[in-house]
Amino acid sequence: MDTKLYDAHARLDDEHWWFLGRRSIVRDTLKRHLHPLVGTRRILDAGCGTGGNLAMLKEFGDVTGIELEHVAVEAARKRTGGSVRILEGGIPDGLPRGESFDVITMFDVLEHLDDPVGAVNALRELLTPTGQLVITVPAFQFLWSKHDDLNHHKRRYDFTELTKHLEQGGMKVGFHSYFNSLLFGPVAAVRLFRKVVPGSEADSDYGSGGGIANWALTKLFSAERHVASRLPVPFGVSVLAISTRA
């Protein structure tokens, strides 16, 4: 990701409809699908960025974050005030070897990696025998836009390709669902329009956030949690999968 985008992420993590909606859907999905444990869950957020999801993850256990970019690590440490251990390191080489986790989350990270299968395999080695890997990724290659280029994405996924990479990394998918489905039609229309009309592409899809439109989109996107956390919705702008060691 371009360094300048980390400033935007730090500002928007707590107010932009995309981040708020995704967090709401992930929270409900974790409530429904995480394995019950005796004691405290050990959670690793791999590629934690500026730390926007760490407080939510703390609702489910003891959280460690890891992030490659130093500027994002510092933003995450400032955000959490030292209440979460945040490591600086990449995936897979910088992962905390010798530790084990009951849950590993990776939110919109796998699409950045040159070797997604190697990354999944490395994360699998950190899971306890019954541990769960929770991943979200952007969906459908035909939705590729300048936003993907700016964020240094290598690919967008459909569920079949995501399953393939997870299985090749030694994982078995349990629950999955697409999400951001209510806005799938408008998003697809806008991105296809921008591809055929020169000069119409925006640098980023995030915008500035705030205002009535942001409030309405937050409510609309978050409402999907009632379905996407229960059932495998067949289409959407993103896809979520929960897998265990094969």
Image: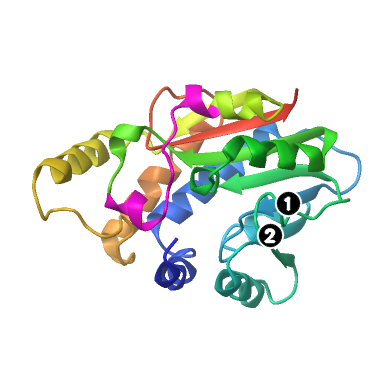
| Quadrant of the snapshot with the C terminus | top right
Establish if 36 lies above or below 58.
Answer: above
Residue type indicated by callout 1: Leu
> What residue is drawn where x is 37% and y is 37%?
237
Q: Which mark, residue 66?
A: 2
Mark 1–mark 2 contact, CB under 8 Å?
Answer: yes
* Mark 1 surroundings within 10 Å by alpha-carbon count, few (fewer than 14), some (14 through 19), many (20 or more): many
**Is residue 100 visible from the viewing direction of this image?**
yes
* Extreme-left residue of the structure: 197
Q: Secondary structure at mark 1?
A: strand
- Residue 78 x, y percent position in the rendering: 63, 78
Residue 183 visible, this angle: no
- Local crowd size for mark 2, using a 10 Å CA cut-off: few (<14), some (14–19), many (≥20): many
Work out whether mark 1 precedes mark 2 in sequence or the reverse, and give the earlier one.
1
- Mark closer to the observer (1, 2): 2
The residue shown at (54%, 48%) is 109
Residue 129, position as x, y percentages in the image = 86, 31
Please tell me in which quadrant of the rendered image residue 70 appears: bottom right
Could you tell me which residue is drawn at 53 percent across and 50 percent down?
A: 23
Q: Position of residue 217 (x, y in %)?
A: 33, 50
Identify the residue under disc 1. 44
Task: Name the kind of residue labelled 2 in the image.
Answer: Ile
Q: Helix or strand or loop: what does disc 2 sit on?
A: strand
Q: Quadrant of residue 167?
A: top right
Give how far across and how far down residue 118 sits, in percent: 65, 38
Question: Which of the two residues, 10 or 31, is positioned nearer the viewer here?
Answer: 10
Q: Residue at x 68, y 62 (%)?
A: 89
Q: Is residue 58 left or right of residue 188?
A: right
Magenta range is 146-162
Indicate yes or no whether the magenta region holds residue 165: no
